Amino acid sequence: HPVTAHAKHHHKHFAFGRTFVGRRHMVAGARIVVPATTTTVLVHQPSEEVIVAPPELPEHDAAETWRVESVLDGTRLVVRREGQIKQVRLVGVSMPAVEEEACGKFLESLATGKSVYLVFDEALAPQDAQGITTAYVYLAEDGTLLNFEMIQSGRGLAEGGYEHNYTELFVAAQAEARTAARGIWASIPAPVE
């Protein structure tokens, strides 16, 4: 069943498989809900605003937590576990050219000193060309996916150029952030359609 916030009204469902549901396909006020175990996108309508639901933390070993030692910028963290230190880049997130410092400070406020789980995308190499670990980073305390949170809050961009497990979800989260004028989108006018 889909991950969704509690709704006040009954909604009609539309399924769109793996097809990205962009603004041109939505009715004003539509709600996008992504089930935790699949990339199927469902649209419920009517709703007060577009809400893109984050994926849930997959099954994991509680002993595999890392502690965030520091944040380098809005896409990279330094984590430690049992004396091992890794630099980790958030899969699917890129740094906006504007407000770089604010984006880094936002990630710092979310993650510094917290325990996290690193989840790897089986379709991607575990390290990038610079040897930096690439992962989905979930907060251990509540399962928040930092990659998604950065994009949905308007403090990161959905990185293009490659496919990953949450490509469509991250693009939808960015569209929501832009529509809601969150973060960097507060100073960038929405496109005229």
Image (cartoon, rainbow, N blue to C red):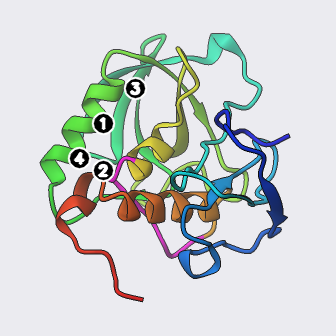
- Sequence-wise first label, 3 or 4: 3
Q: Which residue is mark 4?
A: 103
- Sequence-wise first label, 3 or 1: 3
- Sequence-wise first label, 1 or 2: 1
Question: Could one spot residue 84 in this view of the protein?
Answer: no
Element type at marker 1?
helix
Q: Which residue is mark 2?
A: 155
* Labelled pair 4, 2 in contact (Cβ < 8 Å): yes
The rendered magenta stretch, by its main secondary structure, is classed as: loop
Question: Could one spot residue 184 in this view of the protein?
Answer: yes
Q: Nearer the viewer, mark 3 or mark 1?
A: 1
Marks 2 and 3 sit apart, C-alpha to C-alpha, by: 21 Å
Residue 139 vertical placement versus 75 (above, below): above
Residue 83 vertical placement versus 93 (above, below): above
Q: Quick check: 68 left or right of 60?
A: left
In percent of the image, x 67 and y 33: which residue is there?
6
Q: Nearer the viewer, residue 40 or 23?
A: 23
Q: Amino acid at mark 2?
A: Arg
Q: Which residue is mark 3?
A: 79
In percent of the image, x 58 and y 51: which residue is there?
52
* Labelled pair 3, 1 in contact (Cβ < 8 Å): no
- Sequence-wise first label, 4 or 2: 4
Marks 3 and 4 sit apart, C-alpha to C-alpha, by: 19 Å
Element type at marker 4?
helix
Give the residues drawn in magenta, as a range.
Answer: 153-162
Q: Position of residue 178 (x, y in %)?
A: 37, 64
Q: Which residue is mark 1?
A: 107
Q: Nearer the viewer, residue 26 or 110?
A: 26
* Quarter-of-image position of residue 184: bottom left
Marks 4 and 2 sit apart, C-alpha to C-alpha, by: 5 Å
